[in-house]
Image: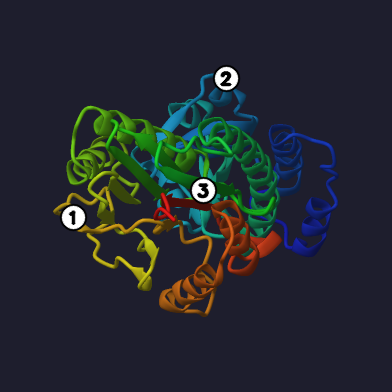
């Protein structure tokens, strides 16, 4: 093998660019590119490691010349060893002389790798993993070698990303649809309408949810939440929070105590995730409502005195701060409470207040049923078919006054 990288970089890049990956899975595409990469760079090993769902570990995914690492599902922490440091810094790196203290993979040392170079696998802001190559002789990887690595890394990263997001999106959508029925049974004395719209097909799935829960003959709990992030993990955490919210509310906890317990769940089991949740407790005979809002868009109240937002709110869940303060107010006959997630009204280049004002104007002009109100909001306020975020919408109306 050559002692250093070839200076004919453009032709090497051309070879990499023309590798046909059509119809291949991400794993097979990576394997094909790694085989070509070994020939093009005249190296002995080529390995792809991918981040696990937590983003804290790297696991061997594909290899050429170091297949035992994949068979053994070798793992190492992000930040640890040569590959882990590339992942942590998201920067290419070269190690001219491999020493035991610099790598965590014993297979590399046992194989006799003397020099190595690697690049991060990144799509947009998403870190997917690391690609690294190794030579069993002293090798000085130059900038042209790194350019070849980066091209291979880009092709592998996009193949992996396309496969992961397609699988995650399908799974997350199935999970969401199984948990969030398209309609809700209205409790006696109330009218209820709900809508859930997933983001456009090219976008990742979020963690929006809604809930309507009859606690007893007098009280009904309505809630809308949004787990921060767009992934299968966000949808999974959404399901966990929704089930916990139901359990705590049915167990007799007041809304503020429910949100405090959801905050603990996130801190303990999902410390890197936050969520916004707005809960409304409706007292039907007392014609009163109590809002407890943890960092969520304010509920809109439509009543005889016109529209108004209940803007009091506390911090999002998952950060361990004091729970939000309950706000109680009269709920006249025929009043409507509208709870939404920010995917309905947020627009790039527009303030949140401007989006909320647009929503209030459309809602105020509505004269029909709650279902028609929801459709009008989606059509006139929502982003349409190009939505990049999920939308959850819940409308609850008290019985109209007797004629």
Q: Residue at x 54, y 31 (%)?
A: 60
Please provide percent x and percent y for residue 373.
Answer: 57, 59
Task: Determine whether 315 is above or below 270 in the image.
Answer: below
The residue shown at (33%, 32%) is 246
On screen, 146 above or below 195? below
Q: Nearer the viewer, residue 401 or 67?
A: 401
Q: Are marks 3 and 2 in contact (CB under 8 Å)?
A: no
Q: Which mark is residue 326?
A: 1
Direction from residue 197 to residue 106 in the image, left or right: left
SS category of the residue bearing label 1: loop
Residue matched to label 2: 71
Measured Cα–Cα span from mark 2 to mark 1: 55 Å
**Residue 174 in picture, x, y percent from top left:** 60, 33
Q: Which residue is mark 3?
A: 206
Badge 2 local density, few (<14 within 10 Å), some, or many (20+)? few
Query: 46 or 346: nearer the eye?
Result: 346
């Amino acid at each position: 093998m050559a002692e250093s990288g070839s200076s004919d970089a453009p032709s090497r890049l051309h070879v990499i660019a023309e590798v046909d990956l059509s119809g291949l899975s991400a794993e097979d595409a990576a394997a094909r590119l790694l085989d070509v990469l070994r020939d093009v760079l005249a190296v002995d090993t080529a390995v792809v490691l991918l981040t696990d769902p937590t983003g804290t570990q790297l696991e061997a995914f594909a290899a050429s010349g170091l297949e035992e690492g994949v068979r053994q599902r070798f793992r190492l922490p992000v930040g640890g060893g040569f590959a882990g440091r590339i992942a942590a810094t998201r920067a290419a790196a070269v190690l001219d002389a491999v020493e035991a203290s610099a790598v965590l993979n014993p297979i590399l040392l046992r194989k006799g790798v003397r020099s190595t170079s690697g690049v991060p696998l990144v799509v947009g802001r998403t870190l997917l993993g690391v690609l690294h190559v190794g030579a069993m002789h002293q090798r000085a990887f130059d900038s042209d070698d790194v350019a070849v690595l980066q091209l291979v890394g880009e092709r592998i990263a996009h193949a992996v990303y396309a496969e992961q997001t397609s699988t995650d999106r399908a799974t997350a959508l199935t999970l969401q649809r199984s948990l969030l029925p398209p309609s809700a049974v209205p409790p006696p004395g109330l009218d209820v309408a709900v809508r859930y719209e997933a983001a456009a097909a090219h976008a990742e799935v979020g963690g929006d949810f809604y809930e309507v829960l009859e606690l007893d003959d007098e009280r009904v709990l309505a809630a809308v939440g949004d787990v921060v992030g767009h992934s299968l993990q966000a949808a999974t955490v959404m399901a966990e929070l929704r089930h916990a919210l139901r359990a705590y509310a049915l167990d007799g906890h007041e809304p503020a105590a429910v949100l405090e317990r959801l905050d603990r769940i996130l801190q303990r089991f999902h410390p890197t995730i936050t969520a916004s949740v707005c809960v409304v407790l409706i007292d039907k005979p007392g014609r009163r409502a109590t809002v407890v809002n943890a960092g969520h868009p304010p509920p809109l109240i439509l009543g005889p005195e016109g529209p108004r937002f209940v803007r009091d709110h506390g911090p999002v869940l998952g950060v361990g701060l004091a729970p939000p303060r309950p706000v109680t107010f009269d709920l006249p006959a025929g009043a409507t409470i509208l709870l939404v997630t920010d995917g309905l009204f947020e627009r790039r280049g527009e303030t949140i207040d401007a989006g909320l004002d647009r929503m209030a104007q459309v809602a105020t002009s509505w004269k029909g049923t709650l279902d028609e109100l929801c459709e009008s909001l989606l059509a006139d306020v929502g982003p349409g078919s190009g939505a990049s975020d999920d939308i959850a919408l819940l409308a609850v109306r008290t019985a109209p006054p007797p004629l």
